[in-house]
Structure formats: structure tokens, C-alpha cells
Image: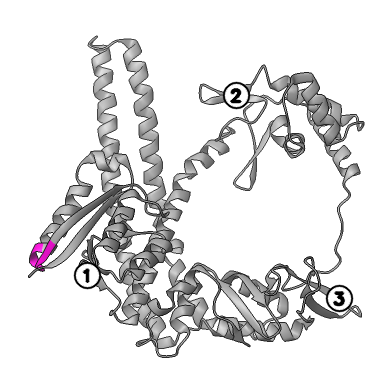
Amino acid sequence: MKKQAVLYARVSTKDQEREGYSIPAQLKLLQQYAASHQFQLVQEFIDVETAKIKGRKQFGEMVRFFEKTPDCRTLLVEKTDRLYRNLHDCLKLEELETEIHLVKEGQIVSKNSRSQDKLVHGFHLLIARHYIENLKEEVKKGMYEKAAKGIYPSKALFGYRNQNRDIEIDPETGPIVQRLFELYATGNYSLADLRKEAFAGTGRKFAKSGIERILKNRFYIGFFLWGGKTYQGTHQPLVSAALFEQVQEVFRSHNRSKYRGHDFAFGGLLQCAYDNCMVTAELKKEKYTYYHCTGHRGKCPLPYFREEELGIRMGQILKDIHIPDSVLETLQEAFQQDRQRMDDCRKEEREKLQRKLTAVRNRMDQAYLDKLDGRITEDFWKRKSAEWQQEEQQVQLALNGLLEAASSDRLLTTRRILELANKAHSLYVRQKPVEQAKLLKIVLSNCALDRTSLYPTYRKPFELIFQAAKNENWLTETISNSSSAFLGRSPPRSV
């Protein structure tokens, strides 16, 4: 009797679905694989949406099918990034003890797989997640190009409106913004007073924080902040630079900043395990630094810790993610293969986008000839030309994003993470507390502390490494036995 199996296929967008070859190509590959391996396909699940977050409709249906059909636990899919790009979905299939056949990757992952195979598959998942996030960033570069030209690349702020791909002063709300600046500049109004005055004069309800954001935003004098950089906009200023500076001086007179004379190395990194308050620091006798619970929720049993003692204990956290040299070499070889696969995928996507770009330009050229010959009207040409130019720009931005994503620095990120895990502790013990804290903040998102133990929460790449490194025997320890730790706090250890 043939073994039962289901197949899963996915594309990210409706455009990919309409192109008509991505889903059929996946189905053909998986059906051929099922036939050659004597599988009986009992269900097919197809999604047309991104896999970076949980909640896909057909993926959820597939999970429910597995839950109701204990005799079927085999899943056929093209490759890792077609199945999932987030940890939640991966753990869900692990809980169901699913045997996953990744056809293009030539890999089978199940509860009986070697720990090394599971580790490599886990890194495939991290790479898939990294790839889509990086691609999203690269596509956004078009917005940065727009910002460089002085055009605000987002929805117009209050007081302005979007008009014909540009930003202009809103005749209804623009005067309101001007009045807010004029009133606050007198120094006779608090934000609460200004809120009441605005409501009385316009009938609009403003939050105090909203008014403050308006009054501190340089957009209204012709500048805007985008991607951490300030640009001079092409939009018309609503208020003068002199009035804006006068308003800022009023703010400075109302809110004098507090100055802290000492920076503490591990500040902001630790949390009290007893009451979830932050762990703060203070200087004693002008030379000894002690860390303790803030006590915002009442008396706390957490004792005071000297910075030197705490630094030694936290070094164990880095020791727990050490990758042996032999394992490091194996993983690096695996990721070199992944790099080649990613290059092939980018090449395929680049060729597809290039074909699409050529098709759009051919349509524009042909339509222009039709306009000259009188076969289409001028209005029709203008409308379709605008649509095609926008489509051309979007395809070109996607092409630029792929080219930038292929840079060697990004492709080497995973290799650097592995090397850091291999050397982190040896680097840590040679550094001063401030530098030690910088290293810890790369590895940790948070760390809870009680009287005897630390409870580190590793950032995602190092979280997986910690699970594999808990036991020295990398080849026999199964990662799946400790997968629940991915979603919460790591087990306590006295260090």
C-alpha cells in the first residue's frame, strides 16, 4: 500500500499567480516526485501570499488536515522558503511530527533526522527570513531616491495634502497648523491650553502628543527626515524658520533635560526575574558600580551585584553558544551551497523581471506608434502611458533591489554570525565592561536575573545555536527536543 502524502505550493503575490508558470511548475515537480517515490497524494494546498508571517489560509488548512488525519504525516514541498519564512509555522509542523520532503534541496526533515540535518534546515529557515526582509528593504530604495530629489515619499502630513504625485498645502488644515505655531510661540500656552484653543476654534480634537509632534516637526519649514537623514523638500513651507525656532525655544524653556554623569555598561540589558522590573545601576563611593532591581513594584529579593561579578557571570552566556571548530567548518560548507542556490534564485528572478520590463517597454513603443497613426486617441495614450511608466518604474526598482541584495557583505552575514558564536567568549574575557556589554547586546535581546541564575533570551540566529550547543555531542542531540525554548525564556542555569 502506498504511503499517503500531501503537497504544498506557494507564490508570494497575485502577479506571480497570474503569470501562470510558478504554481504549475511546483505542482508538476512535486507530482513527479510523488510518483517516483510511490507516494499517494491525498490533498493539495496552494497559497498565494507571503510566508514571512503566520496566518496563511491554505497552510492553516493543511495543519488542520494533519491534525485530523493521523495516518498521513508526509509533506512534499519545493524548498524551505516556499513552505515557511517564520519560526511559528516551522514549530507547528515539528509538533505534528511531519516528515517534510524538500524536493529541490534534496533533503528530508523529520523527528528521526540527524541533528546536523536539522541544524542546517534551521539555518535555511533563518536565511529565508533574512532574504525576504532584505529584499523588502531594497525595494524601499525607490522611496529613498524620491527623498533625495526632495519629494516626501509618504502620505502628506497634517496641513498638507497629496496632489498629482506631489504635496501641496491643504487650504483647510494648513491655516490650523500656522495658528498652532503662532500661539505656542508667544509662550503663553501650554500644550493642554493649545489643545483647548484648537478645539474651540476649529471643532477638531487634538491629542497633546499630536500637537507636540507638529510643533517639533521641521517638515513645516521645508525639511523632512527619511531614513535617518534630513532632506530639503520641494514642498512649500507653512511657517518661517524664525517662527519655528521661537517655538523650539519655548519648548526648551519648559523642559530642561536631565543630565546623568555616568554611563553604566550593562544598563538597559538586564531585567529582574522576580518582578519583571528593570535592573538599574548606581555608583558607590564614586568608584564601585552596583546593579539592583529598580523596586518599582515593591520590595524585591534581588541582591546588589558588583559590575565585575556580573560581568564574569554574563560571560557564561557567550560560552553557551560556542560552536566547535569542526562543526563550524561543516556549517560554513553548507552555507556556501546555500549561497549558490540564492544566486541561482536571484538570477531566475532577475531574468523574469527583465522579460517583464521588455514587455512593458514594447507595449509603450507599439502604443506610441498607434497614437501617431491615429489608431488610438490622445487621452487613451496619456492614461495608458502613465500606467505603463509606473509599472516600468516598479519593475526597475525590483531589479535594482535584486542587484543590491546580491552584494557580498549581505551574503556573508550568516558566516559572520557563525564565526562570532565560535569566538564570542574568548573576545569577551579580554575586554572591558563597556565593550563586553556591546558584545552581549549583539547576542541577546534581553536577560533576566535572580539571586543565583541568569535567564538569557537570545536573538534569533544565536537562539538556534544555543539549542544545538547545550550538549557537547552535536551529532546526537536533537534540536527538536528543545524547540519550545525558541518562543520563550531559556532554561535557568547557575553561573
What label does residue 106 carry, if any? 1
Q: Is residue 195 magenta?
A: no
User: Is residue 252 rendered to the left or right of residue 388?
Assistant: right
Labels 3 and 2: the sequence-earlier one: 2
Tell me the residue that label 2 is attached to. Answer: 161
Quarter of the image where the C terminus is located: bottom right
Q: Residues within 10 Å of mark 3 (few under 14, many from 20)?
A: few
Q: Residues within 10 Å of mark 1 (few under 14, many from 20)?
A: few
What label does residue 350 carry, if any? none
Quarter of the image where the N terminus is located: bottom left
Q: Which of the 4 quarters of the picture holds residue 303?
A: bottom right
- Calculate the distance from the C-alpha at mark 3 to the C-alpha at mark 2: 52 Å
Labels 1 and 3: the sequence-earlier one: 1
- Calculate the distance from the C-alpha at mark 2 to the C-alpha at mark 1: 54 Å
User: Is residue 146 rendered to the left or right of residue 128?
Assistant: right
Q: Which of the 4 quarters of the picture holds residue 102?
A: bottom left
Q: Position of residue 164 (x, y in %)?
A: 51, 21
Q: Position of residue 7 (x, y in %)?
A: 21, 58
Magenta residues?
A: 35-40
